[in-house]
Image: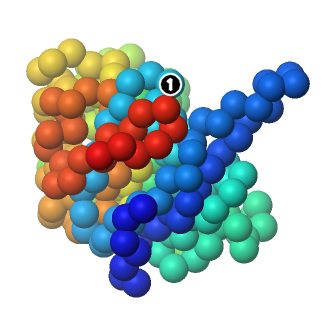
Amino acid sequence: MQTQASSSIILAENVTKVYAAGRLQVTAVRAVSLAVEPGEFVAIVGPSGSGKSTLFYLLGGLTRATEGRVVIDGVDFASLSDAQRTRLRKHRIAFVFQKFNLLPTLSAMGNIEIAYTVSGRKEPLDRAYLDHLSDLLSIRGRLKHRPSELSGGEQQRVAIARALITRPAIVLADEPTGNLDTKNSDAVLQMLLRSNRELGQTTLMITHNPEAASIAGRILHMRDGEIVG
């Protein structure tokens, strides 16, 4: 078990997740404890079936732990109703997935704007911040294009901009380069690193690729539902 720090923005304490499969019970995550400090870039590496994606969903409040607790920015997920958990995710956490999940009928700009609208924020979208994100992610000249007119790397960078537009405290990325070739993978990883450094967000990335994980400041390894190093 890793030592808890009071300043941790992501904290898991003895977290276990058990799924029922008919009469069987499958333990996907087993007594995992970890602490991530504000501004850190942490990568969790493991093969398929190691439990890393289940841990990702637990840390993001997308599923509830069977045992143990997850505390995000001082708030224990277990103490929240479903509506409160959703509100916390909208305001404090951004997700980047392997699938870009862009709306095909909207432009890149439209996909970013609708994410801001859905977040429920009352203040108007900060256009200067949007311009800064577009420059940071090298997509300013592509904002009028629909997803079908963008390369895979460009679509993932738009997905990152969509995640960052609400200025989240935490960015959770699940295999963000899984659908990309080597060149685009490298570009997206550098964009995640730049956003972590320049925007100050805490970043936790799940990946099966040790080379992708190497950009992180700290690497944790998972196997059989446990963090092993």
> Residue at the location (40% across, 84% down)?
6
User: Toward which corner of the image does residue 164 lie, by quadrant?
Assistant: bottom left
Give the camera-side residue of 193 and 14.
14
Q: Would you say 71 lies left or right of 190 here?
A: right
Residue where numbered disc 1 is placed:
49
Q: Is residue 216 visible?
A: yes
Image coordinates of residue 181 in percent, x first then y, are 21, 15
Q: Nearer the viewer, residue 219 or 81?
A: 219
Foreground pick, 76 / 190: 76
Question: Looking at the image, which residue is at 87% across and 24% down?
Answer: 23
- Which of these two is toward me, 47 or 177? 47
- The structure residue drawn at horizontal position 18% and vertical position 49%, both measured from the top left corner, is 216
Residue 3 location, quadrant: bottom left
Residue that appears at 46% across and 67% down: 11
Q: Residue furthest bottom?
A: 6
Is the residue 51 above or below the residue 119 in the image?
A: above
Question: Is 159 placed above or below 47 here?
Answer: below
What percent of the width, then of the height, locates residue 229?
29, 46
Q: Quadrant of residue 166?
A: bottom left
- Horizontal and vertical percent for residue 87? 64, 66
Q: How is the rendered protein coloured?
A: rainbow
Label 1 CA crowd tier, 10 Å (few <14, some 14–19, many 20+): few
Q: Amino acid at mark 1?
A: Gly
Residue 53 point in image, percent of width and height? 50, 36
Q: Is residue 137 visible?
A: no
User: Looking at the rendering, in which quadrant would you find the N terminus?
Assistant: bottom left
